[in-house]
Image (cartoon, grey):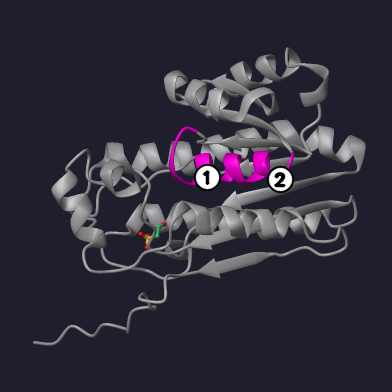
Amino acid sequence: MVVFISGASAGFGRAIAKRFAQGGHHIIANARRKDKLESLQNELGKACEIIACDVADTEYIANALRHLPQDFKHIDVLINNAGLALGLDSSENASLRDWEQMIATNISALVRLTHLVIPQMVARKHGHIINIGSIAGTYPYPGGNVYGATKAFVKQFSLNLRADLYDKNIRVSNIEPGLSGGSEFSLVRFKGDSTKAQKVYENTHPLLPEDIAEAVWWVANLPAHININRIEMMPTTQAPAPLNVAKG
Ligand code: 8X3
């Protein structure tokens, strides 16, 4: 299989790339950081092609795809992994720029990339789109405001794609992890403040990128007649919060 992974330079994306390469598949790794992609390519060898650009630059991606070796021409699995959270402030203090950036990456870029890849999957009557959502798309939490809302979009977009593609032999799955360590997620959320980022994982046992990679691998390798619509996964040490009631 040829597997396209966005956000492949680190964290979930890198672990997913490794898992699929280990399984003998061809990887197209996309991310902005060329040096990180090159180190992934060095590790994975001939099974890995890289496209170094912003995931939102679908024109660049489309052009790069046209120039890939024959073996990488048709994408069998699109893994929309690129995404980010920015800030954890209450809505009245949150930065509008952060909100717009999350919408641009988590929604607009994901939509554009998916729109680019669907026609070739439909033409070949074969494909699997795997989105990386989040439990934040289902469970609200303070400061999750626009981040959670973008992931709710991803969840519903995944289900609506199913409604269009179920009779075209194209599968769509949404993987929704909870608290996850071992990636740059919190460092990005807190704009490089490693003390704040580390605090998120202090004295707990979060999910790891390899755990998410294993779930993605599982849904992609099930017999062709099975579609996993959604997987909601949390570390054992996390649970949906109780409802809050403000008093006083
Ligand atoms: C990441 C999960 O709980 O930090 O999407 O929002 S959470």
Which span is picked out in magenta? 9-24
Q: Is residue 160 left or right of residue 83?
A: right
Magenta-span inclusion, residue 177: no
Q: Position of residue 223 (x, y in %)?
A: 85, 61
Q: Residues within 10 Å of mark 2 (few under 14, many from 20)?
A: few
Instruction: Residue at 42% x, 70% y: name it.
Output: 235
The amino acid sitting under disc 1 is Ala
Q: Nearer the viewer, residue 207 or 159?
A: 207
Q: Is residue 87 left or right of residue 217?
A: left
Compared to residue 139, the image places residue 213 above or below, namely above
Q: Residue furthest left?
A: 248
Q: Position of residue 81 (x, y in %)?
A: 54, 44
Task: Report if residue 89 is visible in the image.
Answer: no
The mark that comes first in sequence, 2 or 1, is: 1
Residue placed under numbered mark 2 in the picture: 23
Instruction: Residue at 81% x, 30% y: name it.
Output: 74
The amino acid sitting under disc 2 is Gly
Q: Nearer the viewer, mark 2 or mark 1?
A: 2
Q: Which of the labelled discs sits on residue 15, or is there none? A: 1
**Quarter of the picture holding the N terminus:** top right
Q: Which of the labelled discs sits on residue 44, or is there none? A: none
